[in-house]
Amino acid sequence: MFVLGIEAATPVAAVAVVHGERVLAERMVNNQRTHSVNLLPMIKAVLEDAQVTREDLGGIAVSSGPGSFTGLRIGMATAKTLAQVWGLPIVGISTLDALAYPLTGQRGLICPILNARKDEVYAAIYRTVEGKLERLEGPMAVRPEELVRRFEPLELPVTVLGDGVPIYGEFFKKQLGSRVFLAPGSARWPRGAPVAELGYRLLMAGEGRDPLELLPNYIRLSEAEVKWLQKQKG
């Protein structure tokens, strides 16, 4: 089965095509252009790179959050529209799962963090158990101080990655010392290939969904929703 993976939950736009665990083609950009401008040309190009047509695809996987509200909406809308037009099943993949997945086997804990603004991060804590990645906590929106407190009783080294590292990396180093390792820049950003590969597993397990049923996982309300609720209460 060929699967198209789409990642747009962060400032990075990424697209990939996989056949099982074989990555056939992948593209990623981290520029100032909006995902609405980047995604469709990238999808067209990555299908051409993989020499795969839309008729060859068995499904679409899309990053379902948490992350940027705008990016998530664009990514989900693009993926759902293509799935509906092409008659394909779709699956949503946690952005945090997709970030952590390539580090399966890493010693200790794996903690992707995404900038959630308001002095918080979106995060989850993982550990490899018997060769498979296991989520211990999350996804959650927490202050970095609270995340450190959750690490302390586990007494294991921690690898931190994600777009929250440039903002909070030094804080974690100060709080955790030699226990923390900050992933290098090339390993911090979400990619399309993990989204596609994790999606392949779900699709093969029969968990593909109708595109109209798939919803993003924002974790917390957007600023507009908070203001609307406050207005209703008022």
Image: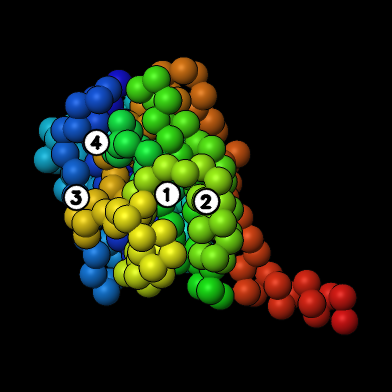
| Residue assigned mark 1 | 111
- Coordinates of residue 132 in the picture (x, y in percent): 39, 25
Q: Which residue is mark 2?
A: 152
Q: Earlier in the sequence, mark 4 or mark 3?
A: 4
Neighbor class of circle 1 (other Cα within 10 Å; few <14, some 14-19, many 20+) is: many
Image side of residue 93 versus residue 21, left or right: right
Specify whether residue 73 is in view: no
State the image coordinates of residue 98 (x, y, percent, origin top left): 38, 42
Q: Which numbered disc, 3 or 1, marks the residue closer to the eye?
A: 1
Label 3 to label 1: alpha-carbon separation: 24 Å
In-image side of 162 versus 183 (left or right): right
Q: Residues within 10 Å of mark 3 (few under 14, many from 20)?
A: some
Give amino acid for label 1.
Cys
Q: Foreground mark, 1 or 2?
A: 2
CA gap, disc 4 and disc 3: 9 Å
Query: Could you tell me which secondary element the residue under label 3 belongs to?
Result: strand
Residue corresponding to mark 3 = 27
What's the residue type where badge 2 is placed? Glu
Please report the residue visible at 53 percent of the width from the left and 31 percent of the height from the top: 209
Looking at the image, residue 66 sits to the left or right of residue 178; the answer is right
Residue picked out by circle 4: 17
Residue displayed at 53% across by 74% down: 119
Mark 3 or mark 1: whose residue is earlier in sequence: 3
Please report whichever mark, 4 or 2, sits nearer to the chain's N-terminal start: 4
Mark-to-mark CA distance, 1 and 2 = 13 Å
Q: Amino acid at mark 4?
A: Val
Q: Would residue 155 be visible to someone looking at this image?
A: yes
Q: Secondary structure at mark 2?
A: helix
